[in-house]
Image: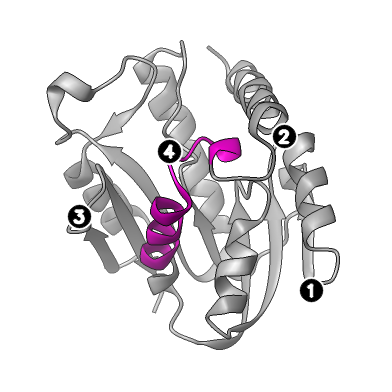
């Protein structure tokens, strides 16, 4: 399956989710707001600064990361990107009073200090695993291109309980992604796999 076909499939999936559940954790296919916040707390560890940084939120949904950063008291410049126009429309309404921009085309993203992506690679639907993995790796290349100081992303883990694993989801090998990022992008790579979700977070710092 081509990347264009994959992106179209993903766009339709999340357009439907936001219509069904609105600007909530369920609307971006998370089980709860609590698990969403836990993922953010792992991803944001890539940022060394607490103020004055710029960040791209790749697959931003309705912009929940903006609220997370504001609650932490961070000062930041934020751009969220999502394929789903329903997501970006909801995000603009929710964050009209905040210093946040939202775009629905990757080409409108500019390099920022950091890029983060939460849950972007989980739902492969009917895509063949090999095609999905090629899409994932191409997208991680985009993270590198869009980030001057570092980037972070998460994936469901292949170490999940077998009886609960689903064929429409992608379960990744954390050892592969550590090696891939370490040999391709930076000497400064870490993998967090010690928090209570069936996933892991990859942090890549460029210095």
Q: Which mark is residue 193?
A: 3
Residue 158 location in percent, x, y? 19, 33
Residue 204 location in percent, x, y? 37, 64
Q: CA distance from mark 3 to mark 2?
A: 29 Å
Name the N-terminal-most of marks 1 and 3: 1
Closer mark to the observer between disc 2 and disc 4: 2
Circle 4 — which element?
helix
Q: In the image, is residue 156 above or below residue 179?
A: above
Residue 143 location in percent, x, y? 53, 54
Name the N-terminal-most of marks 1 and 4: 1
Name the N-terminal-most of marks 1 and 2: 2
Name the N-terminal-most of marks 4 and 3: 4
Q: CA distance from mark 1 to mark 2?
A: 21 Å
Q: CA distance from mark 1 to mark 4?
A: 31 Å
Q: Are marks 2 and 4 in contact (CB under 8 Å)?
A: no
**What residue do we see at 57% from left, 57% from top?**
145
Residue 106 location in percent, x, y? 71, 45
Q: Which residue is mark 4?
A: 137
Circle 3 — which element?
loop
Q: Are marks 3 and 2 in contact (CB under 8 Å)?
A: no
Name the N-terminal-most of marks 2 and 4: 2
Q: Which residue is mark 1?
A: 99
Circle 2 — which element?
loop
Quarter placement of the C terminus: bottom left
Q: Which mark is residue 84?
A: 2
Q: On the image, which quarter does residue 39 sit in? A: bottom left
**What residue do we see at 41% from left, 33% from top?**
122
Q: Which mark is residue 7?
A: none
Please give left or right for residue 77 compared with residue 47 in the image.
Answer: right
Which stretch did the figure color magenta?
A: 26-43
Q: On the image, which quarter does residue 159 sit in? A: top left
């Amino acid at each position: 399956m081509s990347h264009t076909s994959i992106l179209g499939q993903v766009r339709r999936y999340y357009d439907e989710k936001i219509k069904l559940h609105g600007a909530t954790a369920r609307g971006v296919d998370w089980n709860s707001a609590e698990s969403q916040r836990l993922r953010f707390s792992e991803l944001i560890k890539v940022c060394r600064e607490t103020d004055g940084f710029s960040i791209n939120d790749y697959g931003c949904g309705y912009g929940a990361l903006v609220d997370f950063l504001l609650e932490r008291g961070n000062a930041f410049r934020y751009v969220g990107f999502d394929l789903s126009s329903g997501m970006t429309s909801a995000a603009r309404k929710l964050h009209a009073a905040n210093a946040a921009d939202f775009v629905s085309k990757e080409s409108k993203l500019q390099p920022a200090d950091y890029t983060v992506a939460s849950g972007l690679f989980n739902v492969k639907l009917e895509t063949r695993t090999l095609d999905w993995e090629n899409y994932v790796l191409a997208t991680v290349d985009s993270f590198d291109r869009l980030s001057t100081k570092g980037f972070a992303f998460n994936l469901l883990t292949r170490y999940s309980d077998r009886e609960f694993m689903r064929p429409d989801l992608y379960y990744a090998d954390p050892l592969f992604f550590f090696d891939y990022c370490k040999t391709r992008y930076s000497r400064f790579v870490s993998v967090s796999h010690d928090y209570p979700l069936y996933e892991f977070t990859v942090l890549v710092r460029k210095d």
